[in-house]
Image (cartoon, rainbow, N blue to C red):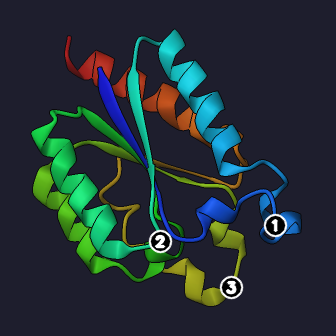
Amino acid sequence: MKILMINGPNLNLLGTRETALYGRTSLPEIEARTQKRARELGIELEAFQSNHEGEIIEKIHAAAISQSCGILINPGGYTHTSVAIRDALLAVDIPFVEVHISNVAAREPFRQKNLFSDIALGTISGLGPYGYILGIEALHELLRTKNR
């Protein structure tokens, strides 16, 4: 089982960026923990982060070619603005789970608009870095039971 984990803009600054909101765990630490759990589940996990919308779209397109069976995505600020990333996810038709470190529903009004949650298998929000572990476990279970 091959899964692509995508992290959007500014998530490369985790651990130092707005620590009261996002905590002190860095993106490499999140990736390592998620990789460890993925290996335990027999998942080949590829981690990718970009601050550029086009690069994220290209990576989503490539996931279809490489036959990834799932995507774990934290679109960051693109959650509220990127119709193009939404369209890419719809175009490749790869099931995905959306993850957010903070509880976006409890944040600023402009963050209440989410362009991904209605097309995601599910959304995990507000559980900090642990949300990534829950996301990989959820994808594993949903994909495994789908293929029975």
Residue shown at 22% from the left, 61% from the top: 58
Q: Residues within 10 Å of mark 1 (few under 14, many from 20)?
A: few
Q: Earlier in the sequence, mark 2 or mark 3?
A: 2
Q: Is residue 147 above or below residue 48?
A: above
Residue receiving disc 2 = 51
Q: Secondary structure at mark 3?
A: loop
> Which numbered circle lies on residue 138?
none
Please tell me whether mark 2 or mark 3 is closer to you in this view: 2
Q: Tell me if 29 is positioned left or right of 111 in this view.
A: right
Percent across and percent down for residue 113 are 48, 80
Q: Is residue 21 above or below residue 148?
A: below
Give the distance between the C-alpha atoms of the residues marked 1 and 3, in whole angstroms.
13 Å
Write down the quadrant of residue 32 in the picture: top right
Q: Earlier in the sequence, mark 1 or mark 3?
A: 1
Q: Amino acid at mark 1?
A: Leu
> Which numbered circle lies on residue 108?
3
Residue shown at 37% from the left, 64% from the top: 116
Between residues 103 and 92, which one lies in front from this camera angle? 92
Residue receiving disc 1 = 21
Q: Amino acid at mark 2?
A: Asn
Residue shown at 46% from the left, 64% from the top: 75
The quadrant of the rendering that contains the C terminus is: top left
Q: Are marks 1 and 3 in contact (CB under 8 Å)?
A: no
Percent across and percent down for residue 112 are 56, 79
Q: Tell me if 61 is positioned left or right of 53 in this view.
A: left
Percent across and percent down for residue 74 are 50, 57
Write down the quadrant of residue 47 in the picture: top left
Q: Amino acid at mark 3?
A: Glu
